[in-house]
Image (spheres, coloured by chain):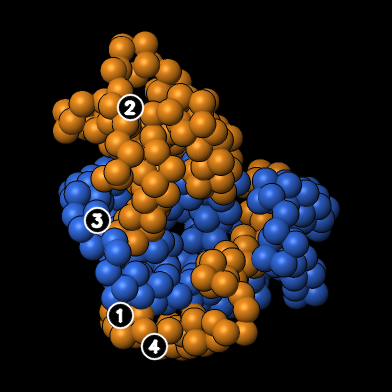
Chain colours: A orange, B blue
Amino acid sequence: MSETALHLVFKISDWFDLFAHYLSLSLLSIGGAISTAPDMHRFLVDQQHWLTDAQFNASIAIAQAAPGPNVLFIALMGWNVGLNAGGMLPGLLGVLTAMLGILIPSTTLTYVAAQWGHRNRELRAVRAFKQGMAPIVVALLIATSWILAGTNGSSLKNWPMWLLTATTAVIVWRSKIHLLWLLGAGALLGWFGLV
Amino acid sequence: MSSSPVSPPPDPSSETRPQPRSLSDLFVSFTLLALQGFGGVLAVVQRELVEKKRWMTREEFIEDWAVAQIMPGPNVVNLSMMIGARYFGLKGAMAALAGMLTVPLVLVLLLALVYAQFAGHPGVAGALRGMGAVAAGLIAATGLKLFGALKQNMLGRRLCIAFGVACFVAIALLRWPLAYVLFGLGSAACVLAFRKLKP
């Protein structure tokens, strides 16, 4: 997809390294896999030269634009590494390698912890955890929204973007309108350059 | 409003309230949730599972979301797995996880294949920007709705506001790393809550 395409020869041990890299990042990805993206860039682009910069950035951008969880950018990175290593089949192998690597440790740990917490939900410590964390994670949502709204620039010039974000927030908060209408409206406004 | 008191949370299996009928119901439900989630699925999960299907209360949603946040891994993936596990154990977790990832994965690969042709089109870039701004608003709305559920929090109104504001300032304005904020503020809030709870 980029003019300076990479042509890799992938050995079994390289696939293993790719898998091991994602395995090792999985338990560090507190707050989502995107928080470990800088380390992925260091490994995949700078150190191994398995991905170009353009492929790395496109993987994140496409996954965020597409429906579904943003963690799919990991799948796209695996896909692009596989494409560089020979084509569609290695691409699919790359998808599997990367996704299993990033997901297996974290989902296992979360599952075990959640089951334990549910079994022991009467424990004082578990109740304290849930009550104590509640205001923080709710505020975190507002903070996340703030950061996302600012990714296109936080200067006053971008006031239509901020207005669109704020209007959306109020409409969704106060009404039962289907969310896809709002996303469609946002896409139209953007298409015609109004925001 | 939920009718449940502050604590302990009711056991979902013992109540007559809506819940997923089967593993395939879970799979299909989560697939549909994921496919509506442009720029993040959380807002859709809250809207559909709490407000429409009523599988869980706002309080339960916040509790699960707290665990999903603090654990490593993609938050929404963690959350869907935990919701699936509430009803059908490990099988439910797998069904919800598969629903969340399978079809969107195919879709994102297809998108990647056509992306190169259209990436440079100014309309496409603009549309993505517009959807990004809306997605940011959806997340804010989710936060605003869940604020109401904090009324029953045993930390009390003042402490909830204090922790909320501190969290917002640290993450949104100071841009501190999430892990420090979650563990720093989180442990302070949990210790306070622990003290307020009777042994």
Q: Secondary structure at mark 3?
A: helix
Q: Which residue is mark 3?
A: B115
Q: CA separation, marks 4 and 1?
A: 8 Å
Observer-nearest of A58 and B104: A58
Residue A63, placed above or below residue B88:
below
Type of residue at label 3? Tyr
Are callouts 1 and 2 both on one chain?
yes
Type of residue at label 2? Thr
Residue B40, placed above or below residue B100:
below
What chain does badge 3 belong to?
A: B
Q: Which residue is mark 1?
A: A191
Are callouts 1 and 3 both on one chain?
no
Q: Secondary structure at mark 4?
A: loop
Q: Earlier in the sequence, mark 1 or mark 2?
A: 2
Are callouts 3 and 2 both on one chain?
no
Q: Position of residue B8 (x, y in %)?
A: 60, 56
Q: Position of residue A173 (x, y in %)?
A: 48, 83
Q: CA separation, marks 4 and 3?
A: 23 Å
**Category of crowding for the residue at label 3, using alpha-carbon neighbours closer than 10 angstroms: few (below 14), some (14–19), many (at least 20):** some
Identify which residue is drawn at 72% across, 67% down: B173
Q: CA separation, marks 1 and 2?
A: 36 Å
